[in-house]
Image: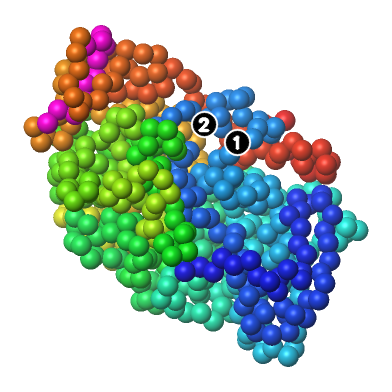
């Protein structure tokens, strides 16, 4: 597993958690670290501390367009969120409390990385070895800056540990183009010099992981520049898309990864997210837990508890994007809008039943497996996630999960390749079959796996992407949303596509044909829930009673229709929300910093 050790040798070096205005400090005896390869390795292990934890990842879609939650995020409530706000959820969804300030306007990890790069020059160590470890450092610096640019746009580019007298300490931001060009340089250096090609544990940075990050970064930047025409960077969009295509294709051609098919169409997808050890077939980098080291995460608790977490629940428009098993759109089915939960989950893309609780889902309770329909003590919409949760009820009551959580996997590489080529207008039938067709085939879909789609799905276009008329791009975006759901990509996918309006979608859930009536959600003959508009005179044991005549929760038709949640609280997303505000305290300390547009 990833080494997370407070290194005694590093205690000889004093690092600050500086935020550009704090006083940097110098080191004691750097030769202890930089004079041997083992010293370099020990230092390089400290870079991994910056990575998100399992808890950060499994809850990373806390702000997304496809989910309802306990409350409307302050970020989507107009002037509630501002540069003085202490929002504990980053734009990517990662918890800033758990990750620390470096995922907000924090720079301590960058100093740690830069200090290593500047001082890794001892000629007693072979050059190839030094370049390998510098490559690791530059990989992390690239990822660090990618997150900064996604969140804030223009940021200061710093490539050395700053002394107190350095004028850069109080300079303003550098341009997005300069910083992203530097990110690309770092990634190319990492790819050329990292010597690790294969890591069986899937916990170390390898050459392929660096390529995967390059594909991720370049796809983001290319599409951001293409669709955010107001930035004046459209002329360079295709250059970045070509970088994404090339990096992804290098991984594909390397042949070291493939989609996991173990478990068949019913389990192959879900097995990626519930196994204790990362699936080495598909997973490229992961966070691994350990019972012996008491390193666990809380996915089960997060997705089953009525009080822990955000009570993340998918909304119905997104569930409608899952195809039928024959490859046709579900929304082409007559009467789709009034189908019950049991009806609408039949004969669908099998990732649906591996992402949310559907009829037939059971959990281990003691020695027995028992039916587990959506629990309305948790879900607001009826679409309750299971993607990161194990089936054992015993894991629900605390930080008990030990299943590995992926940071990079081959499926994303395929999606990045397909989207980059589609945006470049060069995706072929062969490419489609290799990427989208393969992903859908694993999910049990039988139609449309070998040839590019020629027909626009009118529901997908009207509901999600009205400005896109290319059926290929539409279908790739559909596939990306489904395949990578709950993995922390959605916020910034919506941002780079410039579709922030999607964050204001109503939070609607399953269709209820008639209120004040017992409902059997999973069709097993046992009633599960009772949605009422008037208080029932008595209650049936084992049934959850939900009042749908409140300000916060109703049915769209009063006594029938889709469940709604928090439609009484407006959600807004304007141009300014494509970037986060620079915290006011830092603007006051460094007057050369400029606030992002709209946040003054």
Residue at figure coordinates x 59%, y 44% from the top left = 97
Indicate the quadrant containing the C terminus: top left, top right, bottom left or bottom right.
Answer: top right
The span shown in magenta is: 526-536
Residue identified by numbered label 2: 73
**Label of residue 57 in the image:** none
Question: Quarter-wise, where is residue 269 in the image?
Answer: bottom left
Which residue is label 1 attached to? 87
Visible residue check, residue 570:
yes
Circle 1 — which element? loop
Task: Say whether residue 238 is magenta.
Answer: no
Tell which residue pokes out farthest to the right in this image. Answer: 165
33 above or below 348? below
The residue sitting at 58% across, 39% down in the picture is 88
365 or 249, nearer to the observer: 365
Tell me if mark 2 has few (under 14), some (14-19) or many (20+) residues whose alpha carbon lies within 10 angstroms of its own: some
Q: Nearer the viewer, residue 388 or 178?
A: 388
Q: CB of mark 1 within 8 Å of CB of mark 2? A: yes
């Amino acid at each position: 597993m990833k080494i997370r050790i407070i290194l005694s040798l590093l205690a000889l070096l004093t690092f600050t958690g500086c935020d550009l205005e704090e006083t940097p400090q110098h080191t004691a005896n750097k030769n202890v670290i930089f004079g041997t390869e083992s010293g370099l390795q020990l230092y390089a292990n400290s870079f991994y501390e910056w990575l998100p934890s399992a808890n950060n990842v499994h809850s990373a879609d806390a702000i997304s367009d496809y989910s309802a939650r306990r409350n409307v995020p302050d970020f989507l409530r107009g002037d509630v969120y501002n540069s003085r706000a202490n929002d504990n959820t980053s734009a990517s969804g990662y918890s800033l409390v758990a990750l620390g300030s470096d995922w907000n306007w924090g720079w301590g990890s960058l100093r740690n990385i830069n200090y290593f790069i500047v001082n890794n020059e001892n000629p007693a160590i072979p050059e190839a070895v030094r370049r390998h470890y510098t490559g690791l450092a530059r990989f992390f610096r690239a990822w660090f800056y990618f997150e900064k640019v996604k969140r804030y746009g223009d940021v200061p580019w710093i490539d050395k540990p700053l002394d107190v007298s350095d004028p850069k300490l109080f300079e303003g931001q550098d341009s997005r183009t300069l910083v992203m060009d530097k990110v690309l340089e770092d990634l190319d250096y990492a790819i050329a010099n990292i010597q690790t090609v294969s890591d069986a544990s899937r916990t170390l940075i390898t050459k392929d992981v660096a390529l995967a990050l390059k594909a991720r970064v370049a796809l983001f930047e290319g599409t951001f520049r293409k669709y955010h025409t107001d930035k004046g960077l459209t002329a360079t969009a295709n250059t970045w898309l070509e970088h994404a295509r090339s990096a992804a294709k290098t991984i594909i051609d390397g042949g070291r990864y493939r989609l996991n098919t173990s478990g068949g169409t019913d389990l192959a997808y879900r097995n990626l997210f519930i196994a204790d050890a990362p699936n080495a077939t598909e997973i490229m980098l992961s966070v691994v837990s350990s019972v012996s080291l008491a390193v666990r995460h809380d996915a089960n608790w997060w997705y089953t508890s009525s009080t822990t977490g955000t009570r993340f629940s998918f909304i119905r428009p997104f569930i409608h994007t899952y195809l039928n098993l024959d490859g046709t759109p579900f929304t082409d089915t007559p009467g789709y809008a009034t189908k019950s939960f049991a009806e609408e989950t039949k004969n669908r893309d099998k990732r649906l039943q591996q992402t949310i609780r559907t009829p037939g889902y059971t959990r281990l309770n003691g020695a027995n497996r028992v039916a587990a329909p959506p629990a309305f003590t948790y879900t607001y919409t009826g679409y309750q996630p299971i993607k990161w949760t194990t089936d054992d009820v015993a894991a629900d009551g605390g930080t008990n999960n030990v299943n590995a959580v992926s940071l990079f996997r081959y499926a994303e590489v395929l999606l990045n390749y397909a989207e980059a080529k589609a945006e470049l207008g060069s995706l072929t039938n062969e490419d489609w079959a290799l990427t989208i067709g393969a992903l859908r085939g694993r999910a049990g879909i039988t139609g449309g796996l070998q040839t590019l789609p020629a027909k626009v799905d009118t529901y997908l276009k009207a509901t999600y992407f009205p400005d896109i008329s290319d059926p290929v791009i539409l279908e790739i975006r559909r596939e990306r949303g489904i395949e990578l759901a709950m993995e922390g990509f959605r916020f910034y996918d919506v941002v780079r596509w410039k579709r922030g309006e999607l964050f204001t979608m109503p939070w609607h859930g399953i269709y209820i044909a008639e209120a004040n009536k017992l409902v059997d959600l999973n069709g097993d003959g046992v009633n599960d829930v009772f949605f009422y508009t008037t208080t029932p005179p008595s209650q049936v044991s084992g049934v959850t009673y939900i009042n749908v005549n409140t300000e916060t929760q109703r049915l769209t038709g009063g006594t029938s229709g889709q469940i709604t949640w928090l439609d009484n609280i407006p959600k807004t997303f304007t141009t300014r929300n494509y970037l986060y505000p620079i915290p006011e305290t830092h603007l006051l300390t460094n007057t050369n910093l400029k606030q992002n547009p709209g946040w003054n």
